[in-house]
Amino acid sequence: MRVGVLTGGGDCPGLNAVIRAVVRKGEREYGDELIGFTDGWKGVIENRTMPLDVERCRGILPRGGTILGSSRTNPFKVDGGVERSRASLEANNLDALIAVGGEDTLGVANKLAAEGVQVVGVPKTIDNDLSATELTFGFHTAVQICVDAIDRLHTTAESHDRVMVCEVMGRHAGWIATYAGIAGGAAEILIPEERFDINEIAERIKRRHDKGRYASIIVVAEGAQPQEGTMALVSKDVDQFGHVRLGGIGNMVAEQIEALTGFETRVTILGHIQRGGTPTAFDRVLATRFGIAAIEAVHDGEFGTMVALRGGEIVRVPLAEAVTELKTVDPELFRHVAVPFFG
Ligand code: F6P
């Protein structure tokens, strides 16, 4: 078979491990010819490809990013984007396409599948907010990066008796903040799912320091929202999928905490450091399992599906199931495991 591969959306540690697994199994076991589209759906629209074979994939397993490049281009938002995408898939004589991405990239895959394109999805996002799979690769790596940073923030905070606000990624779902906050011993965790009251947080921080304890870490997801009318937020540009470019809530929280508590407060915004660099061993294995499962799904003719992790097993689920709603933080987990450590 001739199979195309693309990686779309924000990059994520483990993408190269997926590509490598698809290529290795496709070429060696099935005798497939593989090509990569560069820069996600943009490369499909513009028919930009690169050959993929076992030799090309040597050494990429531990490398972050994606050798194919990525973009947030949406063919449904580009003039003639869908027609041009179809034309380029035909021009390359493809029997199937493997799309590796998050809700946006897979949302496009789902729509194209409904129009008859033979596509299989692989779930990717550091945010871990895709439904239908228990985990996405990249999440474990992002959390580990955050926890390493928080551990470092603890010691400098202790030396100076400071409050440290650490802003992490998570636009609509606070999985990274929740896991990193729990593992990093945060005094407060602010996530998009639970609106926060800055006054209550300030009170808890004051009480915490009054007891002779010091060094408070506040982990804030970039999409965390204050309760109505308590703090103003600034909105910025939107991308082709309509997402506001975030960043800045950490500074606002820090400013308020310092004003309300009188404690010196500093901010660290981890930003794209969370997405860069080598994947953890866990993510390399998960990404490899997904890649193998995706090329198997192609050969079983199971198009319109996405590979997913459920109960430790790799299964196939309808693409539609993965993209209809975001998987947000389980409120029970948050209340039972995160909240008891607040203050
Ligand atoms: O979707 C993954 C993600 O890492 C989000 O958590 C974050 O809001 C976004 O990407 C930022 O992406 P970029 O700056 O690359 O557009």
Image (cartoon, rainbow, N blue to C red):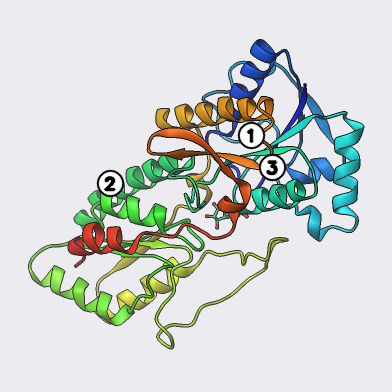
Marks 1/3 in contact by CB < 8 Å: the verdict is: yes
* Residue 108: numbered disc: none
Q: Residue at x 80, y 44 (%)?
A: 116
Q: Residues within 10 Å of mark 3 (few under 14, many from 20)?
A: many
* Residue 70: numbered disc: 3
**Which numbered disc, 2 or 3, marks the residue that appears first in the sequence?**
3
What distance separates the C-alpha of mark 1 from that of mark 3?
7 Å
Q: From the viewer's perspective, is residue 289 above or below residue 115?
A: above
Q: Name which residue type carries label 1.
A: Thr
Q: From the viewer's perspective, is residue 196 above or below residue 75?
A: below
* Residue 66: numbered disc: 1
Residue 98 position, x and y percent, is 69, 35
Q: Residue at x 56, y 51 (%)?
A: 322
Residue mark closest to the camera, 1 vs 2: 1
Q: Quadrant of the N terminus?
A: top right
Q: Quick check: is the Cβ at mark 1 less than 8 Å away from ligand 1?
A: no
Lateral position of residue 312 relative to residue 343, left or right: right
Name the image quarter holding residue 122: top right
**Which numbered disc, 1 or 2, marks the residue that appears first in the sequence?**
1
- Residue that badge 2 annotates: 151
Residue 41 visible in the displayed image: yes
* Front position in the image: 87 or 166: 87
